Amino acid sequence: GDSVTQMEGPVTLSEEACLTINCTYTATGYPSLFWYVQYPGEGLQLLLKATKADDKGSNKGFEATYRKETTSFHLEKGSVQVSDSAVYFCALSELGAQKLVFGQGTRLTINP
Amino acid sequence: GAGVSQTPSNKVTEKGKYVELRCDPISGHTALYWYRQSLGQGPEFLIYFQGTGAADDSGLPNDRFFAVRPEGSVSTLKIQRTERGDSAVYLCASSSSGTSYNEQFFGPGTRLTVL
């Protein structure tokens, strides 16, 4: 079945550092790919998405590119802030299906 | 406008008891989803409604779990004969239509603890 594997955390960085959180997926078809974020004390919210190969999703300085050849959707940011501290979830949704399949999450802590 | 709301925010129950968890989706959203999130894990899909009908219930772990959405808006997740392994955060989400690329908007969750 479909699955998502994320880089294990926790990840701790200093402010202004460069961030990459790896995400790879296994799917039978052509899924849409998502990054969701959960800030402390808040619910899950969509950060960015890409619906087809080579699409780049971006939001709040974060980017991720849908790479079909490597089945990856790595999350990147050039300069992180303390306010980026949160748990990040990579997820997919197969074409024709509606449910999201999530990775296990990566906890990110940014120190000032 | 109002987001997805879930009640109660916390529920503590004893093993063997029956519980109901409620979800109010965003007004006008036809698709509604239930997920379960165990500590340190990503959410796992339970069931998806399109309107009043359960279009996909493949994630329900066993027949102790049941969900309804009788008027196509509010949904209730029902768990019979609760077990300690049912302890988790139960998340509800809604979207404007049930397509794979539509954003799902999540509620804050109900934390269920079975003693």
Image (tube, rainbow, N blue to C red):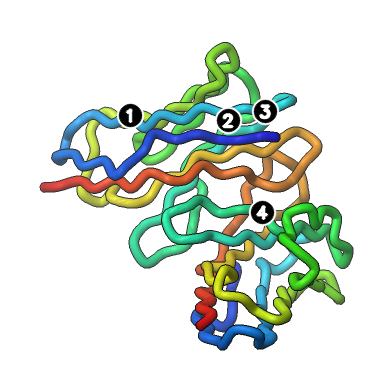
Please give the residue where the numbered disc 2 appears in the rendered image: A50
Residue B73 in percent (x, y) is at 77, 72
Is residue A17 at all visible to an observer of this figure?
yes
Q: Which residue is mark 3?
A: A27
Residues at marks 1 and 3, CA–CA distance in whole angstroms: 22 Å
Q: Which mark is residue B35?
A: none
Dot 4 corresponds to which residue?
B45
Q: Earlier in the sequence, mark 3 or mark 2?
A: 3
Which residue lies at the image location 50% right of the left edge and 81% below the top edge? B10
Q: Residues within 10 Å of mark 4 (few under 14, many from 20)?
A: many
Q: Secondary structure at mark 3?
A: loop
Report the mark closest to the observer, 2 or 4.
Answer: 4
Q: Quadrant of residue A55?
A: top right
User: At label 3, which amino acid type do we have?
Assistant: Ala
The chain containing the residue under callout 1 comes to A
User: Horizontal placement of A110 versus B55: left or right?
Assistant: left
Name the residue nearer the viewer: A53 or A88.
A88
Q: Earlier in the sequence, mark 1 or mark 3?
A: 1
Q: Which residue is mark 1?
A: A20
Q: Chain of mark 4?
A: B
